[in-house]
């Protein structure tokens, strides 16, 4: 019993390290990985018998198998995006789509649509970095820059929930066989509606004009070819899973191998710029953070410390419990929250699982510290503080609530 309290304390210390990362100046990946591995080591050391150690070993192996699928999928997807971003293809296409002069209101809608679509294809961090770089290049007044930045956070998180390439929590719920890829694609409709509603509310008072500097970079044919391979990989992942139940990780690893081979055949894979090197540009601290968090959650499941989460669903219908979990994800990282809920074995219908997918994916937008997109934005945009972001809290809550209601209604239909 004492060991259980110690392990729970380690989990709380890890969570505190994530929350106060900017204060202690220690990367959250290092903290969660330390406490995640240490907690399992303690389980082995203080196991009562050899049979108990075998049970712990079996649980750990199952946990690592789940983590490896998630890891390999993210490595493949993030390598594609890292290559295209490094070659300037994304920024180039973005600037070509922009006119030389545009109204602030239209620019606000353009930013929202781009952030939403791009975050479905790329990871949230990359989508946020590209979108924020666009905003900062416009040299808008500080108050308007912050308004654009808040919209980017909500749009990025909303776009990520409808595809397994866009958000880790969506991928986790999919891998747990709670929703299908076709179910998730339907989520794009209410998610996009909520983003447009927020954009409309935030466009009030935006009456100025913005001149955009055209930056047309030279893009090679091989870069367009790899972009096409990336899009084909996403399409094959969707079709292959729907028709033949092919695991997404297998499809993306196949797509990644094709990318490497095409680069080699086109003489783009040389010693000065080897294609394999683009794996180095992946946000490995993010992947290590997921590893540490999932090890911690697996440990908490092993000692039955997650049973309290089921209590909320015993007294509150899933319709309201999921909505509350979404708001909770603004203060507690959505990855461990989602992992913990999945480990409890809660039984819900499809509409409720879709509601939870939307809630934990978008709910973090309510606070600037509630999602990776918010934290990245706060670090990049001068003057964006917790308090300034909170000024838009009511509008964000209204948009989140609208999206959630539409998701539940859609879930009942499909």
Image: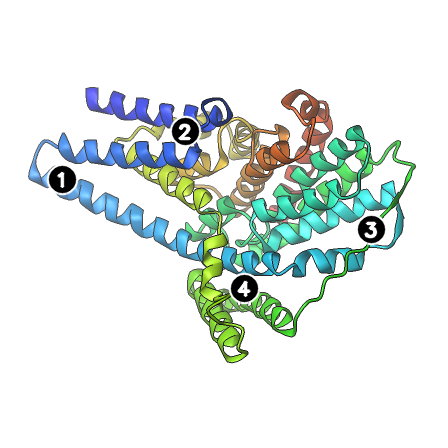
Residue placed at 40% from the left, 52% from the top?
Answer: 71
Q: Which of the marked residues, 1 or 2, is nearer the chain's N terminus?
A: 1
Q: Which of the marked residues, 4 or 3, is nearer the chain's N terminus?
A: 3
Please identify, in this view, whether the residue under mark 3 or under mark 2 is nearer the observer. Answer: 3
Residue placed at 30% from the left, 46% from the top?
Answer: 63
Q: Residues within 10 Å of mark 1 (few under 14, many from 20)?
A: some
Q: Which of the marked residues, 4 or 2, is nearer the chain's N terminus?
A: 4
**Figure quadrant of the N terminus:** top left
Q: From the viewer's perspective, is residue 166 above or below residue 347? A: below
Q: CA distance from mark 4 to mark 2?
A: 32 Å
SS at circle 2: helix
Question: On the rendered structure, is 145 left or right of 81?
Answer: right
Return the mark for residue 213.
3
Return the mark for residue 53.
1
Q: Residues within 10 Å of mark 3 (few under 14, many from 20)?
A: few
Residue at the disc numbered 4: 238
Residue at the disc numbered 2: 309
Residue 345's x, y, as percent? 37, 40
Q: Tags 4 and 2 in contact by the CB under 8 Å rule?
A: no
Please identify, in this view, whether the residue under mark 4 or under mark 3 is nearer the observer. Answer: 3
Q: Which of the marked residues, 3 or 2, is nearer the chain's N terminus?
A: 3
Q: Tags 1 and 2 in contact by the CB under 8 Å rule?
A: no
């Amino acid at each position: 019993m004492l060991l259980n309290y110690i392990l729970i304390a380690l989990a709380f210390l890890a969570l505190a390290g994530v929350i106060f990362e900017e204060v202690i100046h220690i990367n959250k990946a290092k903290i969660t990985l330390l406490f995640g591995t240490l907690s399992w080591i303690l389980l082995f050391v203080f196991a009562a018998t050899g049979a108990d150690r075998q049970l712990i070993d079996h649980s750990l192996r199952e946990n690592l198998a789940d983590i490896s699928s998630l890891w390999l999928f993210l490595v493949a997807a993030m390598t594609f995006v890292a290559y295209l971003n490094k070659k300037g293809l994304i920024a180039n296409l973005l600037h070509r789509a922009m006119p030389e002069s545009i109204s602030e209101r239209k620019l606000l809608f353009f930013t929202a649509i781009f952030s939403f679509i791009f975050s479905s294809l790329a990871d949230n961090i990359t989508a946020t970095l590209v979108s924020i770089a666009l905003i900062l290049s416009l040299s808008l007044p500080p108050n308007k820059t912050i308004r654009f930045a808040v919209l980017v956070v909500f749009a990025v998180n909303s776009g990520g929930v409808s595809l397994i390439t866009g958000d880790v929590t969506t991928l986790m719920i999919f891998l747990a066989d709670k929703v299908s890829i076709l179910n998730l694609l339907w989520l794009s409709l209410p998610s996009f509606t909520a983003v447009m509603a927020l954009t409309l509310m935030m466009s009030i008072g935006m009456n100025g004009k913005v001149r955009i500097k055209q930056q047309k970079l030279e893009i090679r044919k091989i870069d367009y070819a790899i972009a096409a391979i990336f899009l084909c990989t996403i399409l094959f992942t969707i079709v292959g899973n729907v028709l033949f139940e092919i695991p997404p990780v297998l499809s993306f690893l196949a797509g990644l191998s094709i990318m490497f081979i095409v680069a080699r055949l086109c003489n783009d894979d040389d010693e000065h710029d080897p294609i394999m090197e683009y794996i180095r540009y992946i946000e490995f601290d993010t992947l290590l953070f997921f590893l540490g968090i999932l090890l911690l959650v697996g440990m908490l499941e092993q000692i039955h410390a997650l049973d309290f989460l089921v209590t909320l669903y015993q007294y509150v219908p899933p319709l309201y419990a999921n909505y509350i979990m979404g708001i909770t994800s603004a203060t507690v990282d959505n990855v461990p929250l989602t992992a913990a809920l999945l480990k409890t074995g809660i039984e819900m219908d499809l509409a409720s699982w879709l509601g939870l997918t939307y809630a934990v994916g978008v709910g973090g937008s309510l606070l600037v510290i509630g999602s990776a997109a918010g934290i990245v934005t706060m670090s990049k945009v001068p003057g964006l503080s917790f308090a300034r972001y909170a000024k838009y809290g009511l509008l964000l809550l209204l948009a989140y609530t609208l999206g959630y209601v539409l998701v539940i209604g859609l879930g009942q239909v499909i």
